[in-house]
Image (cartoon, helix red, strand yellow):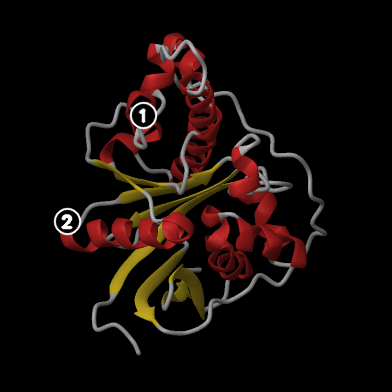
Amino acid sequence: MASTTTLRGWIDGIGVLGPGLNTWAQAQPILAGAVVYQPQPVLVPAAAVLPPPERRRVGLAAKVALAVAQEAIANARQDAAALAAVFSSSGADCDNCDAICQVLASEDRHISPTRFHNSVHNVAAGYWSIASGAMTPATALCAYDGSFGAGLLEALTQVVVDGVGTLLVTYEVPYPEPLHAKRPLPSAFGLALVLMPQPGPHSLAHIQVDLVEAPADRVTLAQLEALRCRIPSARGLPLLQVLAEGRGARVILEYLDPLNLAVDVLPCR
């Protein structure tokens, strides 16, 4: 069964960060099958765009989000301050969550202001507004394992309804033990897309998204498919593979059972 509501937009920029995928420039030939994938620990850049006080407080999750957001903006050659933003994550700052749980389980239950500040789900959006100087609307959401799909739908809705360019940022980091045993995310991962209402000189592809009841597509490479299955923000990897190959195709992305997202991709060049 297909949805009667279709969302459309143009992808102008991509950012990605994951095991062995430190940038879109590195990931593109791997996803296209031109370069052998070599899994390596994620190298998360320092949040150099933040002022020193915020840089000292920022956690790993926000660093991942900022890294892919900056890359997508740079690749799109867009003004970050002019774009709306959607940040989507199933867990956000998992290290901070664990630290707060440990304090609350101890005799001294005083939470530090920094811990409290980083505990809100929109903390990455807040740091992004500081880093980019953006005064445009920023949305933070969570849909558990469907967080990538929910973020894509929300971002494209803003593109279509409001007619504004929108930055989509999806990101995850693993929980420490003992929470990791209950929510075993194997690695940090981030993915960002700059979505525009009209094509421009740097547009990569036009996409059209519908809700469907159809099985999700897999990534060709088994090691990356394992990441797709286990990390919510990596559910967008089949879309990145089609974009890396530079071909027109329909790709089905996992969302919330029984619905998935059918994304029709038409390259601009």
The residue lying at 46 percent from left, 74 percent from top is: 265
Q: Residue 240 got which mark? A: none
Q: What amino acid is labelled 2 in the image?
A: Asp
Residue nearest the observer in this picture, 78 or 62: 62
Q: Nearer the viewer, residue 183 or 174?
A: 183
Depth order, front residue of 98/44: 98
Counting residues from the N terminus, which is met first, the one under dot 2 or under dot 1? 1
For the view shown, which residue lies furthest in the front direction?
Answer: 107
Q: Given the image, on which type of amino acid does mark 1 rest?
A: Ser
Q: Is residue 202 visible?
A: no
| Local secondary structure at mark 1 | helix
Left or right? Give the position of 27 relative to 50.
right
In this rendering, would 148 be left or right of 238?
A: left
Q: Few, some or many C-alpha atoms within 10 Å of disc 1 (few <14, some 14-19, many ≥20)?
A: some
Q: Which mark is residue 132?
A: 1
**Measured along the vertical axis of the image, is residue 115 above or below residue 216?**
above
Instruction: Give SS at disc 2.
Output: helix
State the residue at coordinates (53%, 62%): 236
At x 79%, y 49%, the residue is 39
x, y percent for residue 156 = 30, 61
From what the image shows, is residue 99 above or below residue 124?
above
Q: Find residue 261 and report its horizontal and vertical position in percent.
A: 42, 74
Which residue in the rendered view is the most extreme toward the bottom? 1
- Residue assigned mark 2: 162
* Above/below status of 94 relative to 30: above
Residue shown at the point (47%, 84%) measured from the top left: 214
